[in-house]
Image (spheres, grey):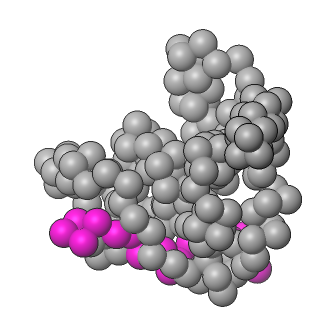
Amino acid sequence: FYRVLYRVLMDTGMRPGEAMALTWRDLDMSGGTIKVEKAITKDANGQAVVSTPKTKGSSRLLPMFGLEDLLLAHHRWQVETGMDASSLVFTNQDGGMVKPWTFNVRELDRVTAAAGITKRVTLYTFRHTFATLHLASGTPLKIVSGWLGHSSIRQTADTYQHASEDVHVDYAQRHTAWLA
């Protein structure tokens, strides 16, 4: 379960509440897309509810980024273990809703420690990594912004586009080569 959730978060850039609200109907395996149109949030009384995503722009269609086989295997596992009663892609041990704010961070801490990662990792770290890697590899800001469900590219740029020293050197060399 955790491995699949981590991969979905890392490979799609979804917010944790959006990923945890996914149902199998939101996944189009043949079309290779994920429909994001809801999120698990808290209501006025602090109870978990499925509601619309954070902003109007947060409802979006994402590519599956090659996750089809992993998700199909996860679905088979869910059916075999009886954890598919709610039709949610990610469920707790009883087959019910997983709340992002009560997610077992000890498990994430254990996984990152085993991987030799010493920096604190949260479920939002996957979103940040998704955006940073796409921007660093040249995916246009407008595309990354749309995938993240941001209302403007400015939000994406201000939050995620921090160029490393290597990127500065690379662009300086590209510019020099272009001038030549």
Place residue 61 in its image quadrant. bottom left
In the picture, residue 41 is in which quadrant?
Answer: bottom right
Which residue lies at the image location 71% right of the left edge and 46% below the top edge? 178
Span colored in magenta: 29-46
**Residue visible at 38% across and 43% down?**
4
Residue 167, given in percent of the width and then of the height, sits at 75, 36
Q: Quadrant of the N terminus?
A: top left
Q: Nearer the viewer, residue 115 or 39?
A: 115
In the image, residue 31 lies in the stretch drawn in magenta: yes
Q: What is the x, y in percent for residue 16?
A: 58, 57
- Side of 25 relative to 34 (left or right): left
| Front residue of 102 and 64 | 64
Q: Is 34 positioned to the left or the right of 84 in the image? A: right
Residue drawn at 54 percent across, 30 percent down: 107
Q: Is residue 81 visible?
A: no
As drawn, which residue projects farthest toward the front? 180
Q: Residue at x 75, y 34 (%)?
A: 173
- Choose top left, top right, bottom left or bottom right for residue 96: bottom left
| Image coords of residue 165 (percent x, y) | 82, 30
Q: Quadrant of the C terminus?
A: top right
Q: Position of residue 151 (x, y in %)?
A: 73, 79
Q: Is residue 52 above or below residue 5?
A: below
Whether residue 34 appears in magenta in the rendering, the answer is: yes
Can residue 72 be seen by looking at this rendering? yes
Seen in the picture, residue 7 relative to 141 is either above or below; the reply is above
Q: Nearer the viewer, residue 82 or 105?
A: 105
